[in-house]
Amino acid sequence: MSASDVELDRSLVQPWVPLTSLVLSVLGLGVSVYLTIEHFTASTTLACPETGALNCLKVTTSEQSAVLGIPVAMLGPVYFVVMLVASLPILWRNKHPAIRYGRLAMAAIGVLFVFYLVFSELFTLDAICLWCTAVHVLAVALFALTAIGTAYADPGDL
């Protein structure tokens, strides 16, 4: 692969990365805000069965639904707001390493928290929340996209 091929690959990746990361952040924010509303209204309209392995109510009201006394439902919107700002196209074009690697670090923190939450669902609660799974998938996709976008950044920009 020649240097011109690498440059071509970068030009193909760069245009869709900022927009896609922004869309994933907005979707994640929407679902996590919904979960936050459900958490504080104690509503059972999660459109998720309450029996068996699929049990959103069991997951969202469990002891594991709070970390250090902070409801996990509140952490989701905070995370996705930060990622939404970090995913703005103008910040993707910014050449400062602190912005690029800060965005990547935030995405990594999100995915590590997802691993903790999925572990809790599978091995502690024996229940899965479909809405939480949607947030988890969006956070993992956002991390993957952020890692790709960071990897394809032009080294000359740094």
Image (spheres, rainbow, N blue to C red):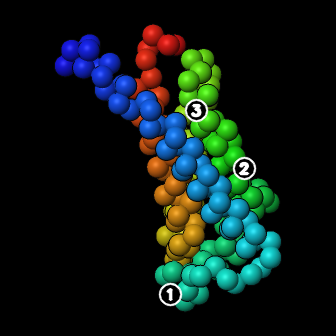
Q: Earlier in the sequence, mark 2 or mark 3?
A: 2
Residue drawn at x 19%, y 19% as measured from the top left: 1
For marks 2 and 3, give the one nearer the viewer: 3
Front residue of 109/37: it is: 37
Judged by depth in the image, the label closer to the viewer, 1 or 2, is 2
Considering only vertical position in the picture, is 3 above or below 122?
A: above
Residue named by callout 3: 89
Q: Nearer the viewer, residue 105 or 11?
A: 11
Amino acid at pointer 2: Val
Which badge, 3 or 1, is on the more N-terminal residue?
1
Label 2 packing within 10 angstroms: few (<14), some (14-19), many (20+) = some
Of circles 3 and 1, the one toward us is: 3
Q: Position of residue 148 (x, y in %)?
A: 42, 34
Q: Position of residue 13 (x, y in %)?
A: 38, 32
- Is label 1 in a helix, a strand or a loop? loop
Q: Is residue 121 above or below residue 3?
A: below
Relative to 29, is 3 on the left or the right? left
Disc 1 marks which residue?
52
Residue 143 visible, this orientation: no
Q: How packed is label 3: few (under 14 Cα within 10 Å), some, or many (20 or more)?
A: some
Which residue sits at x=56%, y=24%? 93
The image position of residue 3, as x and y in percent, is 26, 13
Q: Are marks 1 and 2 in contact (CB under 8 Å)?
A: no
Q: Is residue 66 left or right of residue 17?
A: right
- How far is the residue under mark 3 from the one under mark 1? 43 Å
Q: Kindly identify the residue that appears in the image at 31 percent across and 26 percent down.
A: 9
Depicted 89 relative to depicted 63: above or below: above
Q: Amino acid at mark 3?
A: Pro
According to the picture, the residue beneath numbered tag 2 turns out to be 78
Q: Residue at x 49, y 58 (%)?
A: 137
